Image (cartoon, grey):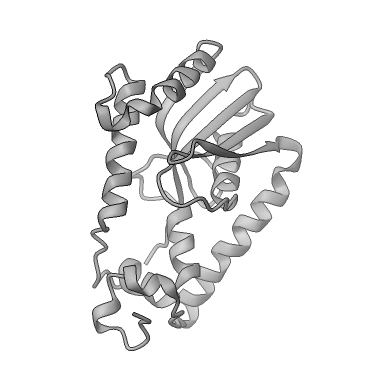
Amino acid sequence: MRLSHSYSSIKLFENCPLRYYRQRITKEVDDEGGEASKYGERIHALLENRLKGSGLPTEAAQYEPLCQSVEKLARQGELYIEKELVLNDNLTPTGWWDADAWLRSKLDVLVIVGNDAVVMDWKTGRRNADQFQMQIFAAQVFKHFPEVQRVKTSLVWLKTMEMDTNQYNRSNVNAVWAEIMKRIQRIHDAYEHGNWPARPSGLCRYCPCRHDCDYARV
């Protein structure tokens, strides 16, 4: 079996290797998502449509200034919405559904302005400034856009309109890749040795495996 990765799949493994195994290796469990994830998907779709030219409905009207700020920035360069970035295991760009797809990322907003890139990711949940996702996004941008020397990333918390920002420089990207590779290697080691321990936590109550898991903490 060929393993492929994304930020969400890496976090899935780190939160609970057994859940990762059942969802992504045996595929015996399908995560249909709860109300919070469905709400997040709906808001993402509304923002995507707005930036593609549609209006915002009442439930998302408060995000109009945010969309206008993205459009203002985009006038200086090129705007990509829901941009798919994919690398094979040689870290060479490939297609989303290509057989050699190894690391996939989908960026809510990407703006390229000369040698600079801006990445924004919409968040509808509770604020948790995990920068690993943005490290992956920045590393992907450097591979897909050779002219880019700096990537500014922002996690945008839509409930409070707070932002967690960071900047990555091409000169330091090797350290970012070292961290990404280290975390992916743990998944490959688990696969090689068939070692998928449960990791009970407060997340068990949201897990699609909880009803027949001997370790679920509910």
Residue at the image position 33 percent from the left and 89 percent from the top:
214
Q: Is residue 208 left or right of residue 165?
A: left
Numbered-mark total: 0
Quadrant of the drawing holding the N terminus: bottom left
Residue 32 x %, y %? 23, 59
Classify residue 216 by image quadrant: bottom left
Residue at the image position 34 percent from the left and 29 percent from the top:
48
Q: State whether residue 176 is above or below residue 2.
A: above
For the residue pair 36 and 180, the one nearer the viewer reads as 36
Q: Is residue 112 left or right of residue 194?
A: right
For the residue pair 94 and 68, the one nearer the viewer reads as 68
Residue 62 x %, y %? 38, 27
Residue at the image position 30 percent from the left and 43 percent from the top:
41
Residue 133 x %, y %? 54, 49
Q: Is residue 129 left or right of residue 4?
A: right
Quadrant of the drawing holding the C terminus: bottom left
Q: Is residue 43 left or right of residue 124?
A: left
Q: State whether residue 17 is above or below residue 147.
A: below
